[in-house]
Structure formats: structure tokens, C-alpha cells
Image (cartoon, rainbow, N blue to C red):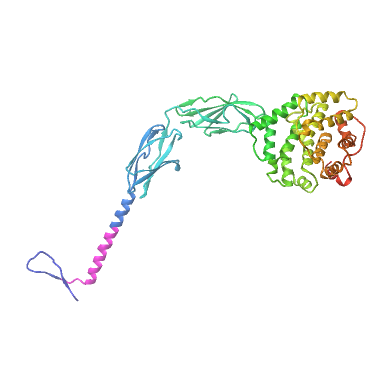
Amino acid sequence: METIHVPRNPNPDGFSVCPISKLMLVLIRCRVTLVASVLSLLLCVGAAEASITVLSPNGGEAWVTGETHTISWTPGTGANAQIDLFKGGSLYTNIVPSTPNDGSYSWTISTGIPTGSDYQVRIADGSGNDKSDSYFTLVNDSMPNKAVNPNPPNGAVDQPTNKQLSWENGGGATSYGVYSDGQFRGVQTETSYNPSTLAHSSTHSWRIDAQNSAGTTTGDPWSFTVISRIREFITLFYNKALGRAPAKIEVDTWEHGYYDYALTFNIDVRFIGREMGRCFFLSQEYLMRNRTNADFITDCYRAFLGRDPNQWELSSWVNGVWTRGQAMTIFAESGEFANRMDLISTQRGDPTRNFVTTMYIGIFDRLVDSGGLAYWADAMAAAQSKRSKAKEMGLLLFDSAEYRAKNASTEQRVINLYRAFMGRYPGGGEIAYWRDQLDQHKKTFEQVLDVFVNSAEFTGILTKYFGPQGSGADVRGPAKARSWEIYQ
């Protein structure tokens, strides 16, 4: 075996011979290297664990919101640090997304952060992170600011009956005392409150008192008014027919131009629904919505009756034969629509005035003016023959400068005749029949008017407004043109 000489002592006289195998020497060298590696790894792990350490707040501190406090830590190796606030063990908010990793950050604590004794901060710098060892406390020694940004705004009108009240923290509040209509409703931490269903046209007051540990700040008095039934009806009609919310001036026009007018001059308030149907569903705006017949019928149910049709109702309409004008008339004249309008007003108006109004709407597409209403209502009331006076009225209105300025086509004149004298839209066959009579000069306009005035259908109209009035010819045209009858 080969041996090597190693010194045993510093004896200058020579060396002692110690036989050590090369294999043992290699094993010794490997063992030394392994021990060194393990020690190096342990030192690295210890250095990583100690890369960043939160010093303050590290638990037990009581910091005041609204003041500035210093967050401190032992920096790690990263250039920048992110600081987060935890509440109850869960992330609450980010204090700063990036700040120099120099071990110190001045934190002005928002008064919007609620007080509590379960806060921690976590600091991360890329090489590691650390969190407060235990909870610290946030307190508020200042009175809270008033609640702000009320919804609805103070003085708001046309609010829905199910309006939710809401507000924003003006600063420093941790809870709120809620008052409405002079009654204390309780203390809550949420910034919204749902009152019970509110009455139409009612006005309500409310107030929010901001509270925290320092005390209570009385809020400003606020108020709002709930929408009236008529304005709610008008608004919903816009939504369901035109698919949009109306501007305030549009609601004002229908309310004051039609509804208030009807109340003032003792006219049936249901005229507003009939006219809205005509103006909306036959408008260019509605046409541009490209609604199918099924869509149109659904829109009518929603606008006139405030509900969706059931499947049987929708199928019956879709499989029937009708014009949109006819359909609107049926909805506007239905008992269900009358019941809905009764919730707004039960005024049905003076029969004579209603008759005159129907004539004006049918011929001029507008409500009767007060002068025309007074004149023709008195004339119809005094006339011994309502039929003759109705014919006279029709001839004069059709021959008026206002109507002649419309430059109405033959078809439009037929439609106006039906709407004025029968209170409904004609079917396609009826229009074709009377248009042929006039265009082919088989009858003059006055002769056609005579047929209308002396018809059984118009006799029924006169009976409705004035009592029994005899009978006359039928103006429905030939049997093949009576498609509208399936809805009678």
C-alpha cells in the first residue's frame, strides 16, 4: 500500500510515518465539503427570512384616523415596497402601491376608514413580505362630517314609489342615524335605506346623522316628491312603446296639454292613452325600432295594460288579421285599460264634450281647442237632430283651412272619417272599398259622409253619447272587407 508522510509534530529531526490510504483522504475531503455547503444553505435561508420585518405598527398601537403616522420596517433587498392594510385578517385596502424601500413611510390615515381593533399592515418588497405580528387599533377622536350627496337629490320630483334612499360618507362616520318623515328609523353602517312603498304624489323629508366614537353630527334636512300616477303612466308609456325614458318636457306636455286639459274641460281622461298610442305606435321613431307584429302586440299590452300578454293572447293576435291602428283602438277601448285609468282618475267627462273631442281628434289629430269645444258642445246639446248636426260639423271641419292644409290623400280622408265618426281605425278592406268609391267618382265625399252618418254603427255611437237615435246603412263595405270584425 502506498503511504504518504504527514507531520505529527514540529520535531525538526524528521517525520513520523503514518500510513493513510488515498480512499480515506477522499472521503474526508467530501465530508468537509458537504458540511460547508449545508452551512452556506442555512445562512442563505436565514438571510431570506430576515429580508423584511414590520416594526410599526406591529400590534397594540392605537392610531387616530385623520392624523399622520409613520409605518416603519427593516428593509429587504428590493428597491421599492408595497404596503397594504388588513382588517380581520383580510385585505382591506392598499395604502401605497410603491414607495422607496427605505424602512419608513408617512401614512395619513383616511377618516373614511372605519375605526376598529383588528388591523394589520403587510409590507412586501419583492424579496419577501412581513405582516404586523398582532392587531393594532384605529380610533377617531374627531367629530364626523355631515353625510353628503343624497340620492334622490334634495328637492327632487317624479321619484318612483319604491325609491331607495342613499348617501355618501362625508368623512369620519362609522355609522348613521336614519330619520324619515320625522321618525327615527334606526342606526346602521350601510349608506342606503329602503323605506316602505311610498304613495303617489306624496312629499317626504329625510335626514342622515353621521356618527363615530367622538359623537354625532346632525345632517342637513332633505326632501323629495314621489311621481304622480299620471306622470308615472306617461313615463311608462314612453318606456314600453318607444323603449326610452322621456325628457321632462315631454312628460310635462302630455300631463298639462292633455291630462290637465281633460280635467279642466270635463273630457274623458282616457283620451290621453288613446292619443299617446296613436302618436307613439304610428310614429317614425317607433317604425325605426323595426318591431315585429308579435313585438308590437307585446308593446301594446305593456303600454296600455301594464303587463305582458300570456301565450294564448299573443298567439290569438299574431294569427289574426288586423292593422296596428285597429289594434290600438281595441286596447284603448278595453275594460282593462279603463280600470287602469281609474287608478289615475275616474273622470269620464261630459258625453257631448267627449263626442266633440272625438271628432276633432279623428279629423285634426289633436285635442279640441277650448273655443271649438264650447261652440260645438253647445250646438250639439241644443240640436234636435244629433245626426244632422254631426254631419254639419263633419262637413265644416273637413272643409276647414286647417284640414285642407294637411293635403290629405284619399286614404287618409277615409281613415279620418272612421276615426271621427266611428272612433276607430278602419281595416285594409274598408280603406280600399271607400278609396275606390271616391277615386272612381262613384260617390262624392258628402255622399260618403251621408252613408257614415246614417249607418247602424254611427247610430250606436250617437246612442252611446246622446241616447237612442234610429238606424241607418252599414258602412263596413262588402263582406270580404270585414277583416276587423273578428275583434268586435
375 drawn magenta: no
Span colored in magenta = 18-38
Say whether residue 436 is left or right of residue 26: right
The image shows residue 188, relative to residue 308, as above or below, that is above
Would you say the magenta stretch is mainly helix, strand or loop? Answer: helix
Q: Position of residue 170 (x, y in %)?
A: 48, 30
Image quadrant occupied by the C terminus: top right
In-front residue for pair 16/67: 67
Q: Position of residue 14 (x, y in %)?
A: 8, 69
The image shows residue 337, relative to residue 45, as above or below, that is above
Name the residue at 6% across, 68% down. 13
In-front residue for pair 278/182: 278
Q: Determine if residue 32 is in view.
A: yes
In-front residue for pair 197/221: 221
Q: Determine if residue 306 is in view.
A: no
Image quadrant occupied by the N terminus: bottom left
Q: Where is residue 362, by image quadrant?
A: top right
Q: Position of residue 305 (x, y in %)?
A: 74, 38
Q: Position of residue 131 (x, y in %)?
A: 38, 44
Residue closest to the far bottom? 1
Q: Where is residue 270, by image quadrant?
A: top right
Count how many numbered circles sit on residues in the image: 0
Name the residue at 55% across, 30% down. 150
